[in-house]
Image (cartoon, coloured by chain):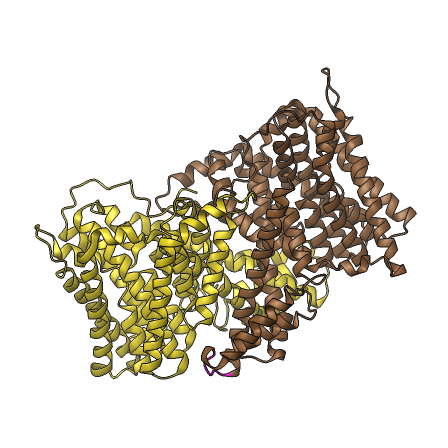
Chain colours: A brown, B yellow
Amino acid sequence: MTATLSLINNSLQWCHPYLVATATEGENYGKALAVSLSLVSLSIYIFSRFFEEIAARLALPSVLGNLVAGVVIGVSGLHLVVLDGGEINPSLSHLIEILSNSTPEQVQAVFDGPVPLIIDEYAEFGVGVLLFLIGLESDLTELLKVGFQSASVAIVGVILPFVLGFMGLTYIFHVPTLPALFAGAALTATSIGITAKVMQDIGVLKSKEGQIILGAAILDDILGIVILAVVISIVDTGEVDVIKAAKLILIAATFMISAVVMNRFFASWFVTQLEKLKSPNRGMSYFILFILLSFIAGIIGLEPILGAFAAGLILGGTEARERLINGIGVLSVVFSTVFFVSIGAKTDLSVLNPSVPANQEGLIIAGFLIVVAIVGKVTAGFFAFSDEKINNLGIGTGMIPRGEVGLVFAGLGAATGALPPSIDVAIVLMVIGTTFLAPPLLRLVFDTSQSPETLVKSDPDGSV
Amino acid sequence: MTATLSLINNSLQWCHPYLVATATEGENYGKALAVSLSLVSLSIYIFSRFFEEIAARLALPSVLGNLVAGVVIGVSGLHLVVLDGGEINPSLSHLIEILSNSTPEQVQAVFDGPVPLIIDEYAEFGVGVLLFLIGLESDLTELLKVGFQSASVAIVGVILPFVLGFMGLTYIFHVPTLPALFAGAALTATSIGITAKVMQDIGVLKSKEGQIILGAAILDDILGIVILAVVISIVDTGEVDVIKAAKLILIAATFMISAVVMNRFFASWFVTQLEKLKSPNRGMSYFILFILLSFIAGIIGLEPILGAFAAGLILGGTEARERLINGIGVLSVVFSTVFFVSIGAKTDLSVLNPSVPANQEGLIIAGFLIVVAIVGKVTAGFFAFSDEKINNLGIGTGMIPRGEVGLVFAGLGAATGALPPSIDVAIVLMVIGTTFLAPPLLRLVFDTSQSPETLVKSDPDGSV
C-alpha cells in the first residue's frame, strides 16, 4: 500500500509543474482540504467495499466489513484516515502536498482541524439516519403480536448481560464505575439488522423462533437506546446521580411513550396532511420530523439518535413507511458507512498488544465481555416460555450478535472521553466476536437444511 | 418571526436552570455548534418546504422555492442562516446561548468558522450528487435520436446568449472581463430538470417540440458545464490565457469524450461485474465512481461537478440507470436543497436598492441579462430546421428557464471572489426571472388545452 502510494507520488512529482497552477497560500490550504477530503472519502469507501465483499463471501454482515476496513486504514493500520489528531501516512501527506501544492504543515493542519470535524459530522448524520431507519423498521404492531415471549427474552436479555458485565468489571476487574456502565450497556442491545440478516441467511427468519427473536431484538433496541441515553447523561454529569438517572429514565420513557402515542394517533393524520401538499418534494417534511425530534431529544438531555429513532417509530406505522425505508436506504448506507469506518479508524488496537504487560488486562476484559455477551443472551432465550415445543437455545443464540448499537456505544463512549482505550477496544472486540460467532453457532443449533429465504428485505438499499 | 423567536427565548429563559446541565467551556462550544447546526438545518428545511409548497401551488419549479427561502432566511432577510461571517439574528443567537449555555462570543465564533464550513460541504456534496443525477438522466441515445435539430438549437442557444451577454456587459456596461465571462456563461445552460418539469406541467413534453427541447437542454447542460470549467479555470489563474483555455477545452472535451466512450464500452461490463459481487451494499461501488471522477476532474484542473456529471453520464446507458436515479433521488433532494438555499442565503439583495445611485447599474444589468437570456434562446429555437411544420417559437421559449446550472455559476463565481455583488445578484435575478417567466410564456405559445402528463418522472424523489 505504502509502496503504491510512493509510486503514485513519484509519478506525480515528475509531472508536478504541469498539474498545479500557481496559487496563493490560502488557496493551497483550501485545495489541501478538498484533496484531503476526497482521498479520505475514497479510502473509506474503497476499503469498506473491499472488506464488505470479503464479509459477504464469508456470510458475515457488512457492518463487520466496515469496521475491519476502518481498522485497516485508521490509527491501528495504514494511517490514511486519522481522526484524532495523530500523524497521517507520510506517503499520503506527500501525495496531498503535490496535488494541492501545499506544505506538510498545511496538510497536517487540515487533518488536525476541518477533516475530522467534517467526517464526524457525516458520521453523526449517518448514525442518525440509521436509527431513523431502525425506528421505521421497528413495527410496534409486529412487536405486540409476538408479545410476552419476545418481551421476557428482551428484558432478561438486557438486564442479565448488563448486570453480569457491570458487576464483573467492577468487582473482578476493578474497572471504574463509568466505563463499567458503558461496557455493561454495550452488552445489552441485539442489532435488528444483523440478527435479521443472519436468520435470513440460514432460513429461519419466519419460524416461530425467528419471530420471537425479531420481536425481542426490536424491544431490545429500544431498551438499549434508552440505556444509552441514560448512561451518556450520567457520563456528562461526571457521577452516578440516582435521582438524575430516574428523571432521565422518566424523560426517556415519556419521550418514547409520546412516540408510541404519536405513532397511534398523530402519524396517519400527519401523513394524510402531507400527501395533500402539492410540492414534488413534500416527502422532505418527514425528513424535517427526523431533524426536529433529534434536536428536541438533544435539548431535553437525551441523545439526538433517540429522537431520530422516535421519528422513525412514529412514521413506522403509516402508509409512508415502505417508501421511507426505500428512500432513506441509500442515505443510510452512504453515511453510516462513514460512521462504522470511523469507529474502526479510531480504534487503537496497539493497546491490546499482549507483549505489553499493561495490555493483558484489556484482552482478558474482551474475553470476559464476549463470554458474558453469549451467556447472557443464551440464558435469556430460555425465558421464552411456550406451550409448544420451542428451540430456546436457538432463540438465545439468535440474540447474540450486537452490531450497530454496540458500536454506537463504543463510538459515543470514546467521544465523551469516559472510556479508557482498553475498555473501548474490548467493546469493539466483543461486537466483532459476537457477530463473528453467531452465524456458525446458529447453524449448529438450528436445522439448516432449509433453503435461504429471500423475501425479507433486510437491506432495502442493497439493490442500488 | 423575530417576535416568535423572542417568545421562545423568554419561555426558555424561565426554565433555563432545568434545561441546561453544568458543563465546561469547551463542552459549551461543542454544544453551541450542535445546537446551531440543528437550528440552521431546521431553518433551511422548514423554510424551503414552505416556499416550495407556495411555488408548487403557483405551478413554479421547487428550485425557485429553495432560492426564495434562502433569500428570506439569509443575509438579505432574517439573518438565521449566515454563511459569510455576517451577524446572525440576535434572537437566534440568544436562543442558542440559552440552549447550549454558551456566550454570544462563542455563538458568533461557531457561525464564523465551523457552521459555514459544514454547510458548504453539505452544499457542495449536494450539487455534486445533483449533477451525478443530471448525468444519469442525460441519455446519450435519446440525444442522438433528436439529432441535428437539438444540436443546432443547443449550439446557437449557447453561443448567442454567451456572446450577446459578454459583449453587452463589456462594451455597453464596461464590466471587467472576468465577471462578464461568468455572466455570459451563466446565460448558456437551460436546466433539464426545470425545462422537463415545466413542459410536463403544461403537457407538451412528449410532442416533437418537447423532444427537441429536451435533447437540446441535455446537450446544453454538457456545453454549459464545459464552459463553467473553462471560466472557473480562467478565474483561478487571474487572466484570460488563450492557450490555457484551449488546453482546458481540450481536457474537458477529452474528459467528456472519455465519458462517452466509457458509457459505450466500459459501463455495461462494469455494471455486470458489480452485479456479480455478493455484498448487499455492492451498489456503493457506483458511488465510488462518482467520488473518484469528481476527484480526478478536480486534480486535472476541471471542476469536481464535471466529474460527477461524467460519472452519471457513464452509468446513464446501463441497466443500473433507473435504480441509481431512484436511489440517488433522496440524496440529491436532501443535499441540493442545502445548496440552493445557501445560494439564496448568500445573496445580498441590498446592493439592488434603487435609492442608492451606485446600485442602479446592478438593476439595469439584471434587466439586460433577462432580455439577452430570452432573446438568445428564442432565436435559437428558430434554428430547429424541420421538413414538418414545427412550433419554433415554442422550442425557443422552452429553452428559457436557466435554473440549477445558472445558480451553480452564480454560487461558484461568488465563491471564487471574481463576481462583484451586483453582477452576482443580477445573475440570480436573471435565473429567477427566466424561471418565473417561462411557464406563462410557454402557456401562451403552446396549445395548453391538453391535460398534464404524469408519465415522466422529472422528480424521482418526490414520492418519499
Q: Is residue A295 visible?
A: no
Determine which quarter of the picture holds residue B184: bottom left
Q: Identify the residue at horizontal 73%, vertical 46% (top origin).
A: A431
Question: Which residue is nearer to you in this view: A49 or A308?
Answer: A49
| Camera sees residue B235 | yes
Left or right of A171? Residue B30 is left
Q: Position of residue B376 (x, y in %)?
A: 18, 67
| Number of numbered discs visible in the structure rendering | 0
- View extreme (top): residue: A387
Residue A123 relative to residue B428: left or right: right
Residue A444 image offset from top left, x and y in percent: 74, 30
Judged left or right of residue A256, residue B366 is left
Q: Is residue B356 above or below residue B2?
A: below
> Residue A23 magenta-drawn?
yes
Q: Position of residue A441 (x, y in %)?
A: 74, 34
| Residue B298 picture location, percent across and down | 45, 69
Residue numbers of the magenta segment? A20-24
The question of residue A32 being in magenta is answered with no
Q: Main secondary structure of the magenta part?
A: loop
Q: Is residue B66 left or right of residue A339?
A: left
Which of these two is toward me, B188 or A244? B188
Quarter that holds the N terminus of chain A:
bottom right
